[in-house]
């Protein structure tokens, strides 16, 4: 049952939320129509021209049903896990017998590949059966287990079938037995965080507190001295998997300090935010204020000093990692899609704990910009790296920009991002609402129909909007509530003149932590939210060296960019006139309908230069120009070319 | 004898040129006083806190005089070669018995480490005696041989002692026998070019044409299909030395096309320019017009599309390589000191062949900026990488800027640059003059006393100047010439109102390929050159994305920069007002006397931002500021901090 009986916030069951939104449905429908079938082909090595994934083959070999060698990366099993999780999220809202049968067949295969003690991992089972748990730094066994557990929980929630869940419970039990404080246990923790999140989810569905305790153990153990990973390297059985990991410092894996003492976001960005999610989870479950304080400090370090305006994080082009405060280069950054997904997951948890709306501003920023930019509008191409400025000709092999792809890729050898986008889109509902025993929090403005179950009665809610292309949100509530409930409507940071109408009458609301509070029994009521959110010039803190003298354009949660397709090449020669306000116009043809922003500015002319003249004393000639900006999430969906978010200004 | 008997230009013997210059002597004196002794300690592993070089130890082991293992890189022997070459250049102008004895002892050691067939290479002799010549791609045997030959030629020129020369002749003979067109010869060429240059020098001193023919063979063979390096990888004896070389394309080693067909500067910058030097040499010796045309095309590609204003080349931060036209990022580039040395060597050769002054503009640019920036003013620290913009806090481990060092390093594991700077400073004289049988070309403005030997008589020349801090150059010539000679005085690209006075009378000169032509018998004559060269704003071609809307400041050959020491931190917040001309003032205290340039501009204030606010709608506040620029070559000689060459402008 999913009755909201606690005063703590939690997400609604996905199966209760049906999304049908002008902005989002063009992406969410890709999951079932394109991505899941495409990934299925990938898992089966049936995509021409793409690297084989080896995924299901590995499970067949591990199950003893096929001869052969392990293929792919050490964490290859997670592609199967993420596919199953996306399938589960999809089945939660749309039953599909054929798809369910396919998933069941994969689950059966996973079961057959499970060791009798519960262990699952095709890399170690096939390739290094004697080296289980001997290389936590690089082995990704706990990371892989975590993704499989998350998938099993999602599949159980969606279908009520418990086979997968029971398979993973057996593995989780093995993990809880293997790791812990006792003398005969390993006092270690994952090289790539993920198991912690997953064990919390397993606790939520099983109510078995040992999973929670193990998750907490992994967090509490991390960063103690002597450093587990450095000690592990010295052991006899340690066998290096990634030569480049040699000499990585504990900073890379956030094991440089006990997690409660960490104050800056460091190391590999995905590892970091997954860990922060788990810290938030444990803080939520144990009401651990010290951990919450650490979460807030780390969150603030990210969003106030180390985050791109697009919600991208991990500004180093090497090792997908955080660097230092205000170091946000636009053309050589990594800003991995998965890291922004992790940031959204972290923010959602922080709102759950604190009931503060501001976290959702960042969640929305990550979802509407970096996460969506990660996928082509046809669902067939993906960005792993999300730069804010691209000059395609300079993104060449064996340079500092080799990782920057000007065109979305069909698939990747390390394919973490595409399935992560799929599961994020398929579970978008989790971000829209949070509820406790007498409140419903409305966080995102996405058209949907939802059932909320309170202790006494059910509330049916229909939200209709064309957000972010307009800022009217209509909510229709029907219920047979006996008691008053609270409706908490998020007031986003960009909203001006935020007004709420209850049955066409202006409603004078109070504000609590960024939410407009509406109370009522809502038998059959119409709530309308209206605000202004025009296209705006945004400036960065002057300490962000990369953005000095530059401006970005946003409208609501959307960050805009210039593309070569609209503005010719050499976007670096453009200077925006910020004395002229940006002009918005809805274009129903472009990208299935979007608001386009027009700007005025100047452009350096080539007229007084010939191509064979590199430096000279002649002053540039500036010519007037009209510029057209489009949402960043849509970039690279037309012809190949330059793109820029931060634009120089006339000063 | 060094009588100029040909109509081709060549350098004067170093021993005939005594430099005593206000600008240069503070660097050139470091060679003998600091660098040679310091490097000697390095070669002997006697520097506390620095990685051991293993250099002389390797030779002792190879000579069978010591037990032990090879240490250092595969090309470690070149450090010894470059030290000997710097010593030779120094001894050419300043006899020093103790230093000469030290050099002789090293030469003796090299001789004892030589195989009976002539082979010298401590790596292969100690570590892989059966793998000689089996990995030309990475083995650096020919590269190492080249540096040793160059050193031997220099030592012979300086001391007239032929022991070292004869040692290297034996090795050169082995190389000429081993490589070539015949069936029993290896049809290969060096993975890192250098032997070609060296064989030309060996020809010059021995007049044995087979060395020239072998140099030509290496060039002509390069880039033929099938590619030698790709084929070599498939052979049984091939053993990889650098794992990262796997999958390097032939572009990296300029073996992607026959050298005559190459039109763009590609791959590893030092390899490239060393090869272009050899192409110029062979073109000069064989009067090969096709090769000269290729040299001109490659030169133009570099200087018109791929060179920093400082004469830095190799704009990729990875692999020290060229990237693509106009791709000149300022903060992540490599611009290795050695590459600029190679560019200077290439330019000097082009002037020798074409008698055109414009090449010397680039030679001067490289020498006065990147090469000098490569060494600290106390001679004890070196830059390998030469960025044009540094924010030290962001140059951290395991990012795209890890290679950028904000402070000159004591020494390097791969220490190619420091000894290369030493030999360049010690041979600075070669750049000042070129001469043929009846002309003396004056290329650089550096105070010196020189003897030029023409067929009939000797000319004594004294040049006195405070260039580049002022632009008066006095030349006093004394001779007993019977015939008229031509004095060709370079007119640099930055000179305005260039005027020549002969014995205090204005001389109406003709201009030939950028040189002012003065004719006379010069018994006892005074020539004065005067020109204007004020500090100027320089703009880059608008296609250079990194410099759009920016300006650099130059005065004569010197590029200027802002340093944090003079302008506080966050140089990115500065915008120069180009409507106000730069103001020059000589400061005799700073850097031993230099012209400082003052600019006006604005700076973004932090006043309307707090550190915890990353993005916002508030417009920046610009405050008036006065800026102080100093020569780029001197940066980083005061306190640690930010630096920038290209500065944003008010537009």
Image: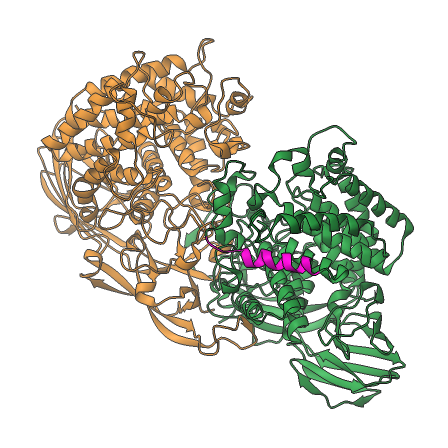
Chain colours: A orange, B green
Q: Compared to B255, does B345 lie above or below?
A: below
Question: Residue B83, how many percent across, how many down?
Answer: 76, 49
Q: Residue at x 65, y 33 (%)?
A: B127
Question: Residue B19, how many percent across, how many down?
Answer: 82, 65
Q: Where is residue A624, by image quadrant? A: bottom left
Left or right, A53 with reference to A251? left
Q: Compared to B442, does B76 lie above or below?
A: above
Left or right, A245 with reference to A357? right
Front-lying residue, B322 or A647: B322
Q: Residue at x 71, y 47 (%)?
A: B171
Q: Where is residue A582, by image quadrant? A: bottom left
Q: Please tell me whether the stretch drawn in magenta is mainly helix, strand or loop.
A: helix
Q: Where is residue B139, by image quadrant? A: top right
Q: Compared to A399, does B303 lie above or below?
A: below
Observer able to see residue A507: no
Q: Quadrant of the N terminus of chain B?
A: bottom right
Which residue lies most toward the front here?
A: B183
Front-lying residue, B209 or A449: B209
Question: Residue A51, how many percent across, how many down?
Answer: 31, 39
Front-lying residue, B374 or B351: B351
In magenta segment, residue B210? yes
Question: Residue B93, how many percent across, how many down?
Answer: 85, 61
Q: Compared to A638, does B80 lie above or below?
A: above
Front-lying residue, B601 or A633: A633
In magenta segment, residue B349? no
Give the magenta part as a residue range.
Answer: B209-225
How many numbered callouts? 0
């Amino acid at each position: 049952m999913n009755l909201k009986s606690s005063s703590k916030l939690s997400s609604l069951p996905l199966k209760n939320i049906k999304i049908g939104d002008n902005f989002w449905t063009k992406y969410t429908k890709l999951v079932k129509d394109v991505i899941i079938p495409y990934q299925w082909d990938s898992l089966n090595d049936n995509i021409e021209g793409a690297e084989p994934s080896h995924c299901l083959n590995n499970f067949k070999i591990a199950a003893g049903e096929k001869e052969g060698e392990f293929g792919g990366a050490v964490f290859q099993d997670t592609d199967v896990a993420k596919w199953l999780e996306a399938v589960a999220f999809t089945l939660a809202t749309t039953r599909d017998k054929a798809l369910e049968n396919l998933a069941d067949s994969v689950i059966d295969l996973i079961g057959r590949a499970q060791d009798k003690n519960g262990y699952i991992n095709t890399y170690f089972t096939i390739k290094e059966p004697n080296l289980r748990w001997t290389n936590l730094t690089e082995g990704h066994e706990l990371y892989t287990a975590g993704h499989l557990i998350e998938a099993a929980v999602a599949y159980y929630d969606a279908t009520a079938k418990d086979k997968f869940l029971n398979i993973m419970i057996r593995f989780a039990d093995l993990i809880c037995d293997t790791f812990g404080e006792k003398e005969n246990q390993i006092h270690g923790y994952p090289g790539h965080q993920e198991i912690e999140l997953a064990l919390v989810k397993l606790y939520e569905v099983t109510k078995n507190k040992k999973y929670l305790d193990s998750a907490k153990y992994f967090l509490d153990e991390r960063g103690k001295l002597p450093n587990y990973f450095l000690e592990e390297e010295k052991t006899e059985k340690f066998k290096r998997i990634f030569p480049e990991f040699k000499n990585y410092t504990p900073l890379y894996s956030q094991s440089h300090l006990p997690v409660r003492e960490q104050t800056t976001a460091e190391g590999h960005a995905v590892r970091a935010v997954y860990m922060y999610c788990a810290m938030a989870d444990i803080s939520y479950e144990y009401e651990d204020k010290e951990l919450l304080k650490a979460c807030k400090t780390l969150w603030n370090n990210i969003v106030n000093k180390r985050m791109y305006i697009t919600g991208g994080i991990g500004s180093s082009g090497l090792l997908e990692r955080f660097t230092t405060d205000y170091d946000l280069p636009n053309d050589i950054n990594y800003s991995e899609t998965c890291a922004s997904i992790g940031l959204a997951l972290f923010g959602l948890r922080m709102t759950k704990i604190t009931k503060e709306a501001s976290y959702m501003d960042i969640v929305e920023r990550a979802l509407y910009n970096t996460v969506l930019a990660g996928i082509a509008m046809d669902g067939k191409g993906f960005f792993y790296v999300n730069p804010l400025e691209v000059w395609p000709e300079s993104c060449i092999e064996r340079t500092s920009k080799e990782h920057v792809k000007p065109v979305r890729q069909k698939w990747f050898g390390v394919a973490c991002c595409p399935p992560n986008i799929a599961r994020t889109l398929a579970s978008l509902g989790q971000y829209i609402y949070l509820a406790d025993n007498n409140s419903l929090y409305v966080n995102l403005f996405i058209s949907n129909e939802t059932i909320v179950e309170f202790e006494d009665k059910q509330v049916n809610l229909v939200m209709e909007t064309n957000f972010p292309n307009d800022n009217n949100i209509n909510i229709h509530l029907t219920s047979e509530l006996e008691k008053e409930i609270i409706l908490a409507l998020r007031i986003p940071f960009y909203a001006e003149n935020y007004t709420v109408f209850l049955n066409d009458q202006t409603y004078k609301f109070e504000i609590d932590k960024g939410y407009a509070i509406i109370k009522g029994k809502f038998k059959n009521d119409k709530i309308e939210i209206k605000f202004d959110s025009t296209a705006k010039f945004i400036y960065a803190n002057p300490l962000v060296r990369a953005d000095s003298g530059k401006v970005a354009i946003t409208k609501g949660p959307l960050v805009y960019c210039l593309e070569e397709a609209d503005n010719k090449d050499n976007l670096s020669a453009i200077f925006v006139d910020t004395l002229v306000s940006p002009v918005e116009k809805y274009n129903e043809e472009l990208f299935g309908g979007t608001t386009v922003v027009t700007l005025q500015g100047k452009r350096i002319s080539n007229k007084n230069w010939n191509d064979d003249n590199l430096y000279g004393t002649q002053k540039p000639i500036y010519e007037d120009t009209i510029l057209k900006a489009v949402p960043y999430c849509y970039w690279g969906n037309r012809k190949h070319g330059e793109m820029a978010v931060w634009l120089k200004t006339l000063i």
